């Protein structure tokens, strides 16, 4: 009897704790100002190839989110604008102004962030972009100018064209393959044959994350997967071409046949993209047949093959967070606001639009939106997760998130 | 005759080992799942793509709340991609296999405040947890799919139903897992068959 009472008291205490924890969630609306000004603004994103489709899909959700009643009078000078200005003290929780977000064709994460920071001679993208897509975290130097909001999670998959049995590699073996000291598959447990490692566009976050993982895991601070004499570039005989291929499309490497057997290739790429788009992971010339075939093999790293489960749990060895990157003047994290900080920044115009879109991505519960998605009826957090999943990625793992947010915030 | 019956009994007993978790709904691919009943939090199962799937390429495993026998099945809403495991070829069997960690309770991909509506749970019927307003399913499914999660072709899909360990306290002795009971039953059947055959042979000699 006594034990039953103690158990009941314990359960009640746990329930209370749970309620307390729930009430501490923040919606990152801050306390003072908002980015809504009753005018629809257009903001443009650019950079990452990996997140190009994903951000377009998230833009579509945001652009169609419920907001103000707008002026639809055909002869009105304010056509399209809100009929009622945003109330100063009552935050509208979707896209009040009906702002419009859109994405330009990929240039790579570093090129996207460079368009915002203009560091080291970087130039603006054409057309000019207002925020960046990045599949890597901004560097310390970049974070002096921009902030990163990690809204999704991916894994770097090590892959080989079809016909090769599943293998398991250690980071050191991966290092040795790209530095050309392991040159035959039989050395790492595969059927004998010369290994052909491939390079990658250095502006891509996918290049940077892979390089940095091997630098750390194999203790070689100077490792560069593009530098080895055995590493192939986009086309032409070995050493005759210095342009690495763009990431995440296996056809680029298996359609090249000068001097190598493309089926002996090894490369890396986004698990999200490669697992979702069969045409991207398709090989050409499998078994001498010149037609795309979906036979890509994942190679395990330290015993783990990438999958949604270990990427969400952040247990896959080469996990990476995908970032929405903003200029600090547009959207930045202010830690001091009770209870869990605030996403602050622009109050009007394009700058305010970026701030509100950033908040939208990082709200961690359906309850923080006051209306559901008008097309699916889902709460917006559910809808955002569904879109992230549909593109092969996971929402940011709980352990990586900034307290009270759905995002891992770097600022 | 008795010898034949004994052999048949042995075959049936051993066959039960493989048949325990092998089934399919509308999808025609055949999956073999090493554990399908009395699943508790922390349990795992080996899932084998036994037949009907792609022999090479991408084969993935997830836990779902519905199978494609339900005409409303939609993989994004009804399967938790946070549970996804990518299968790899097991050299011993030459089949794609993966180790699926089951979830019991809210789907792992449902971070949020008090289990936001729109997400769902797999749990035994007598689980008193409310899971917010989220629907709960006492029968869920293991899904195997070739060519990516979005591939809904029946020939590339296989589903096996799974059920969960009751939370109600009972006076029963702790249940032994099938992986223990079935081999023991098989060995018992084989021993019985051997004894029958031996006895029969002994009596014919006499």
Image (cartoon, helix red, strand yellow):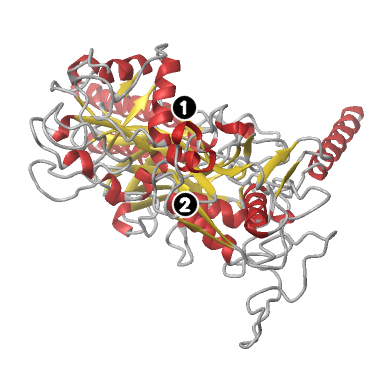
Going by the picture, which residue comes out furthest to the front? Answer: A121
Foreground of the two, A241 or B90: A241
Image coordinates for residue B73, horizontal then vertical, percent = 47, 62
Decide: is A85 above or below A76: above
Q: In this figure, which residue is indicated by the disc labeled 1?
A: B180
Q: Is residue A352 or residue B163 the one in the foreground?
A: A352
Q: Secondary structure at mark 1?
A: helix
| Disc 1 crowd, CA 10 A, few/some/many (<14, 14-19, 20+) | few
Q: Position of residue B29 (x, y in %)?
A: 31, 51
Q: Is residue A42 visible?
A: yes
User: For residue B200, what is the image quadrant?
Assistant: top left
Discs 1 and 2 lie in a common subunit? no
Label 1 – label 2 distance at C-alpha? 46 Å
Q: Which residue is mark 2?
A: A54
At 68% across and 41% down in the image, what residue appears? A332
Q: Which mark is residue A100?
A: none
Q: Is residue A270 left or right of residue A294?
A: right
Residue B55 at least partly seen: no
> Which residue is drawn at the image coordinates 25% and 46% (left, top)?
B54
Q: Is residue A252 above or below residue A222?
A: below
Residue plotted at (70% across, 51% down): A346
Q: Chain of mark 1?
A: B
- Badge 2 marks a residue whose secondary structure is helix
Q: Using a 10 Å C-alpha cutoff, classify the residue at mark 2 as few (fewer than 14 neighbours), some (14 to 19) or many (20 or more).
A: many
């Amino acid at each position: 009897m006594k034990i039953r009472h103690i158990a009941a008291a314990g359960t009640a205490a746990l329930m209370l704790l749970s309620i307390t924890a729930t009430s501490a969630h923040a919606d990152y609306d801050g306390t003072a100002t908002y980015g809504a000004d009753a005018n629809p603004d257009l903001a443009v994103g650019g950079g990452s190839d990996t997140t190009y489709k994903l951000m377009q899909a998230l833009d579509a959700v945001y652009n169609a989110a419920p907001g103000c009643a707008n002026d639809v009078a055909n002869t009105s000078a304010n056509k399209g604008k809100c009929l009622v200005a945003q109330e100063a003290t009552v935050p509208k929780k979707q896209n009040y102004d009906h702002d419009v977000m859109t994405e330009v064709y990929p240039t790579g994460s570093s090129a996207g962030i460079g368009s915002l920071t203009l560091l080291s001679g970087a130039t603006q993208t054409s057309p000019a972009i207002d925020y960046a897509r990045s599949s890597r975290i901004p560097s310390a130097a970049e974070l002096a100018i921009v902030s990163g909001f990690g809204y999704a999670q991916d894994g770097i998959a090590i892959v080989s064209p079809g016909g090769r049995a599943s293998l398991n590699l250690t980071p050191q073996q991966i290092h040795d393959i790209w530095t050309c000291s392991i040159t035959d598959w039989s050395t790492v447990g595969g059927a004998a044959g010369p290994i052909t490692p491939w390079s990658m566009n250095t502006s891509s976050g996918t290049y940077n994350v892979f390089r940095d993982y091997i630098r750390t895991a194999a203790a070689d601070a100077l490792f560069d997967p593009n530098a080895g004499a055995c590493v192939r570039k986009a086309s032409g005989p070995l050493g005759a071409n210095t342009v690495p291929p763009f990431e995440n499309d296996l056809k680029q490497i298996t359609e090249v046949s000068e001097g190598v057997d493309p089926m002996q290739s090894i490369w890396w790429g986004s698990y999200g993209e490669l697992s979702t788009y069969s045409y991207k992971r398709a090989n050409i010339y499998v078994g001498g047949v010149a037609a795309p075939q979906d036979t890509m093999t994942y190679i395990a790293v330290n015993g783990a093959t990438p999958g949604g489960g270990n990427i969400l749990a952040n247990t896959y060895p080469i996990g990476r967070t995908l970032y929405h990157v903003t200029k600090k003047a547009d959207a930045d994290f202010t830690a001091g606001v009770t209870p869990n900080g605030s996403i602050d920044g622009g109050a009007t115009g394009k700058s305010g639009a970026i701030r509100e879109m950033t908040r939208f991505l990082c709200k961690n519960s359906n309850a923080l939106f006051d209306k559901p998605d008008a097309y699916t009826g889902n709460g917006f957090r559910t809808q955002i997760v569904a879109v992230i999943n549909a593109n092969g990625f996971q929402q940011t793992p709980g352990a990586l998130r900034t307290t009270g947010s759905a995002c891992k915030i770097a600022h | 005759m008795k010898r034949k019956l004994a052999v048949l009994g042995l075959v049936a007993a051993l066959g039960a080992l493989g048949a325990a978790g092998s089934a399919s709904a509308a999808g025609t691919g055949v999956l073999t799942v090493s554990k399908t009943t009395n699943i508790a939090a922390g349990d795992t199962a080996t899932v084998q793509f036994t037949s009907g799937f792609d022999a090479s390429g991408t084969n993935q495993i997830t836990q779902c709340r519905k199978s494609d026998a339900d005409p409303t099945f939609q993989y994004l809403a009804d399967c938790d991609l946070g549970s996804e495991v990518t299968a790899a070829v097991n050299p011993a069997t030459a089949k794609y296999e993966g180790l699926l960690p089951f979830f019991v309770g809210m789907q792992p991909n449902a971070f949020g405040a008090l289990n936001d509506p729109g997400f769902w749970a797999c749990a035994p019927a007598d689980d008193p947890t409310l899971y917010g307003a989220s629907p709960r399913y006492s029968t869920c499914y293991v899904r195997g799919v070739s060519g990516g999660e979005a591939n809904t072709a029946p020939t590339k899909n296989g589903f096996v139903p799974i059920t969960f360990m009751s939370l109600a306290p009972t006076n029963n002795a702790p249940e032994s897992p099938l992986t223990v009971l079935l081999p023991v039953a098989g060995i018992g059947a084989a021993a019985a068959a051997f004894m029958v055959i031996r006895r029969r042979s002994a009596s014919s000699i006499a």
